[in-house]
Amino acid sequence: MPLLRGRYGSDPASVAHDAIEHARAKGICAVLIDTAGRMHVDKDLVEEMKKIVRVSRPDLRVLVVDALTGNDAVEQARGFHSHVGVDAVIVAKADADTKGGAVLSVAYVTGKPILFLGTGQSYEDLEPFSPEKYVNSILPFEEK
């Protein structure tokens, strides 16, 4: 899979546009645009994200949050969903969040599905989200 990136300081929306046009020209049916590390409280970065969404017109917007940031993950989800919209969520480091509140709260504030839980450092460590398995992991029930 080709990786396209702009020069340091390039306009991210322009890089996204170029990647989409490259994919069209090569018959590639999907483009992943990773904006990496945008803070929901940084107005300039939020405006940049809005421009990326406006230019790229994505079919699916997936937010990745870090479970270990707790309430900040919830605020990120709330902020991004209100500014650019979120279609689904991936929660990283879910294996290290013993209480599990971030996962439930992010799903609640966005009203969007959790697709995967990250439980390690590799792609194989992305587990499809199972509500039943998740609830059982945070609220173990005893068999009678």
Image (cartoon, helix red, strand yellow):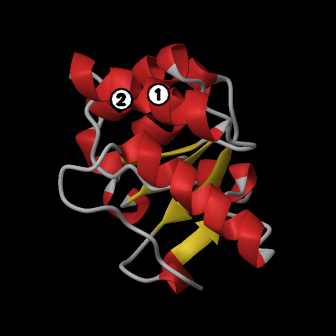
Of 44 and 132, the residue lying toward us: 44
Q: Is residue 122 visible?
A: yes
Residue at (63% x, 67% y) in the render: 22
Q: Give the labeled residue for mark 2.
A: 48
- In the rendered view, does 21 fall on the left or right side of 45? right
Which of the two residues, 71 or 61, is positioned nearer the viewer here? 61
Residue 20, compared with residue 89, is above or below; it is below
Tell me the kind of residue under disc 1.
Lys
How far apart marks 1 and 2 lie (CA) works out to 5 Å
Total tally of numbered discs in the picture: 2
Label 2: state its secondary structure.
helix
Q: In x, y percent, where is residue 28?
A: 76, 73
Residue plotted at (25% across, 32% down): 39
Q: Position of residue 84 (x, y in %)?
A: 54, 23
Q: Which residue is mark 1?
A: 51
Query: Residue 71 is drawn in which quadrant?
Result: top left
Mark 2 crowdedness (10 Å alpha carbons): few <14, some 14-19, many ≥20: some
- Indicate the quadrant where residue 26 lies: bottom right
Residue at the image point whose x is 27% and y is 47% from the top? 37
Residue 37 horizontal side relative to residue 84, left or right: left
